Amino acid sequence: MNEQEFISLWQKEKPIYSAWGLFIIEQIKASLEEQGKDLKTFLKIDIQEPRLKSDESILDKAFHRPEKSYQDPYHQIEDKVGIRFVVLLTEDIDFICETIQRNSLWKFDNCKHFAQEKISEPLLFSYQSVHYVLRPTEDFIYNDIEIPSNTPCEVQIRTLLQHAHAELTHDSIYKAQKKVHPEVHRTVAKSMALIETTDEFFSQATKKLNYGPLQEHGIAEGLDSLFLKNTELKPISQRSSLVVYDAFEQFLDDSTLESISDFLERNSFIFEKIKDRYFSEVFFKQSVVLFVYWMMRNKKRRLNQDWPLSRSLLENIANDLGISID
């Protein structure tokens, strides 16, 4: 395949690659929301569309890179379309990785993971990211475009600091028009060592600040999922949620989510009450309200005693359950 044949096929198939990338974005973002993630805070750079390689870039990679030796460049180049997710912490990367690996709509090849590279080359400090190549498990149609099962899309996942390092070094080193001096490589390696250390410090500090029964047992995420599934309305967490959870932290354990779920299954009318107030009362936009309904039924005395917010909220919830607040 010569350059002209290559670019003609690329022009023809661009809509296929674009559709496949967009489908992946929608799938991953929807799954993150179903698991209780607020995309506005979880994803540090908003992503709406996939990135297609430019004609010039893909031709250069296919035919003019001395370090590349493709036998079939069109089908061997797997990043013709790409997606990048940027998050705050390294554990957030793991969360997206698990989301990708659970989805049965695609096959995945985990072609790069910085954690594995730390084990294989512990003395090396260089570009860090997680790369997957995803292909559909079968041919399918999306947005009126047929997407063959051999269509690849590269997904990159990084922390903000890893992303900053990659953005700085990609054009200045990877695409440098002249030989890069060793001291430059050394400086970049030192910066990556510092970034890796800082990422670890951020993770440690975040765990110490935020980790407790609420996080350990995934209470907020679990209630967000219940809220979304049963009301078809997106839960929006506010500071008042944490105030409530802090006041009643002793009731958050490994059985709480199951107990609340069973309670709501027996009292499914609660979701209609929430939907009635969702657009008029901010507290009813938060999944913590499910916890408060459960507390009102099971721990009413303690709820009354230590309730940190407006008493009118408790009165509404008690009325919904048909019980006295006292």
Image (tube, grey):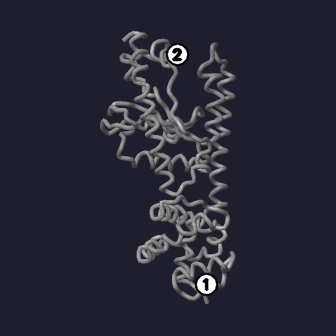
- On residue 247, the disc is none
Label 1: state its secondary structure. Answer: helix
At x 37%, y 23%, the residue is 75
Q: Amino acid at mark 2?
A: Glu
Q: Residue at x 34, y 31 (%)?
A: 150
Q: Nearer the viewer, residue 30 or 315?
A: 315
**Residue 51 place in picture, x, y as percent:** 52, 30
Q: Residues within 10 Å of mark 1 (few under 14, many from 20)?
A: few
User: If the image is split into quadrants, where does the C terminus sit?
Assistant: bottom right
Q: Amino acid at mark 1?
A: Arg
Q: Which residue is mark 2?
A: 56
Place of residue 8 in the rendered image (x, y in percent of width and height, measured from the top left): 41, 15
Q: Which residue is mark 1?
A: 302
Quadrant position of the N terminus in the picture? top left
Instruction: Establish if 174 lies above or below 31.
Output: above
Q: Residue furthest left?
A: 138
Residue 199: x and y in percent read 64, 45
Between 79 and 197, the one nearer to me in the picture: 79
Q: Is residue 17 above or below residue 91?
A: above
Residues at marks 1 and 2, CA–CA distance in whole angstroms? 67 Å
